[in-house]
Amino acid sequence: MRGNMKYEGSVYRPPSEARSLIIQATIGCAHNTCVFCSMYRAKDFRVRQMEEIKRDILEGAGAYGKRVEKIFLADGDALCIPTEEMLEILEFIREKMPWIHQISSYATTQDLLEKGEEELKAIREAGLALLYIGAESGDDVVLHRMAKGVTADQIGEAGVKAKEAGFKTSVTLISGLGSQERKAEHAIESARLISRMRPDYLGFLTLMLDEPAPICRLVERGEFSLLTPHEVMEEMELFLSHVDSEGTIFRANHASNYVNLRGNLNEDRAALLDRVRRAKRQMDYKEEYFRGL
């Protein structure tokens, strides 16, 4: 929900936050070098002034009242806000909008590793409940090529640390990010990573080219090969055959996905694999023009 609130640049949020009040606590992303990402290229990163954030919270409370029950703290790096300031923001939300039942934000691996365990627990107890973690891949070669700035081991450590602090976690992977060269490694190592993190939610996107993401230049120069829909399903079959994350709610039903998949791990894994294999046999894939974001 945006109402009449003023936002700087394009604002992005997870699909599940469609009905949330978006509070732009930071502008852009502190990392902002991921080769596949174009979301924050036009923004210089900064943490917004506290009075600006509080003004937006008050405006949102006045405009929507109890019609809004969730808040998403944007942009791409809200957890990097110093802990004392984050606690002040969360306390202000509780004071002015006590009916809010969920506050969430993106969380980078770097943010989670830099904060101490007690800091994370304090933030969780103050009301931030759900963290969206963009893992993208569990393969270190892919992570390096995509300039994520972290290793799979660090992503796994960050995910475990968030869970131990009491957060619910929602992790994102990207089908096709390994190119044809690293398709198998991307699938299998991503399954290994998720088996370690055991997130509450797991979402798969499928790679799409979006200017001005640097990956577009790699494709143009022939340095990155996009997967066909059939190859994406081969990759997904490998992932599902290797993942062990009991209780994780699994979704691959984003606009970018060639085949819509949803279920719970591990209980629905056989059914998910059956759906993937059936799509492969029947070549039953979403047409490209339906994949627009």
Image (cartoon, helix red, strand yellow):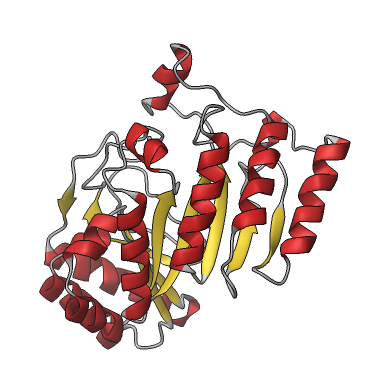
Residue 44, percent from left and from top: 18, 40
As drawn, 152 above or below 21: above
Which residue is more in the foreground, 49 or 35?
35
Q: Quadrant of the C terminus?
A: top right
Where is residue 223? Give x, y as percent: 44, 17
For the image, the number of numbered tags is: 0
Q: Position of residue 269 (x, y in %)?
A: 71, 63
Q: Residue at x 30, y 36 (%)?
A: 147
| Residue 142 lies in quadrant | top left
Instruction: Say whether residue 33 is visible.
Output: yes
Which part of the image, by quadrant, shows the N terminus? Answer: bottom left
In this rendering, is residue 193 above or below 36?
below
Who's the residue at 46% across and 29% down the image?
210
Vertical position of residue 120 compared to residue 219: above or below: below
What is the quadrant of residue 258 in the picture? top right
Residue most extreme to the right = 282
Task: Please identify the residue farthest to the top as the structure is shown.
Answer: 221
Please state which of residues 55 and 253 is positioned toward the viewer in this rendering: 253
In the shown orientation, is residue 289 left or right of residue 185? right
x and y, in percent, of residue 133 in the image: 39, 59
9 horizontally vs 260: left or right: left
235 on left or right of 76: right
Which residue is at a point 18% across and 68% down the rendered structure image?
A: 115
In the picture provided, is 257 more to the left or to the right than 63? right
